Amino acid sequence: MAKKDVERLLIAGGKDKMGRLKYDEIETKPLFVAAANQDGFNFTMEELDGVLRESGDSFDSYGNPRKRGIWWT
């Protein structure tokens, strides 16, 4: 279930620019996971890392304003 929630968040962020912006502004992975859990996505940092590793994506941010290349379209 948790893997599905990570995937659901990454797909939602790929479709919704405002949602993506909210999460892109979060600096740390623990705060990112906490915000996602508050928004109804149930997963841990380790589960997020696993999905990102499988997809070849990195949590690193870049640019100004901050962006992440984790979102699925």
Image: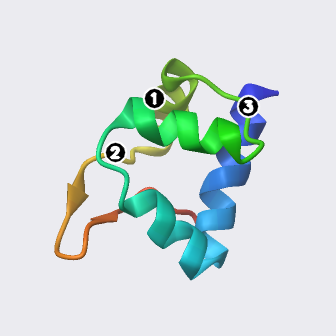
Left or right placement of residue 19 versus residue 24 in this view: right
**Residue where numbered disc 2 is placed:** 59
Where does residue 18 sit, x and y in percent of width and height? 56, 78
Left or right placement of residue 23 versus residue 47 in this view: left
The quarter of the displayed image where residue 12 is located: bottom right
Q: Earlier in the sequence, mark 3 or mark 2?
A: 3
**Residue where numbered disc 1 is placed:** 49
The span from disc 3 to disc 1 (Cα, nearest Å) is: 14 Å
Mark 1 touches mark 2? (CB < 8 Å): yes
In the image, what residue occupies the spot 46% across and 42% down? Answer: 32
**Residue where numbered disc 3 is placed:** 42
Looking at the image, which residue sits at the far right?
1
Q: Nearer the viewer, residue 51 or 22?
A: 22
In the image, what residue occupies the spot 49% across and 24% down? Answer: 45
Give the amino acid type for the residue marked by disc 2 in the picture. Phe
Q: Secondary structure at mark 1?
A: helix
Where does residue 29 sit, x and y in percent of width and height? 38, 35
Mark 2 neighbour class, 10 Å CA radius: few under 14, some 14 to 19, many 20 or more: some
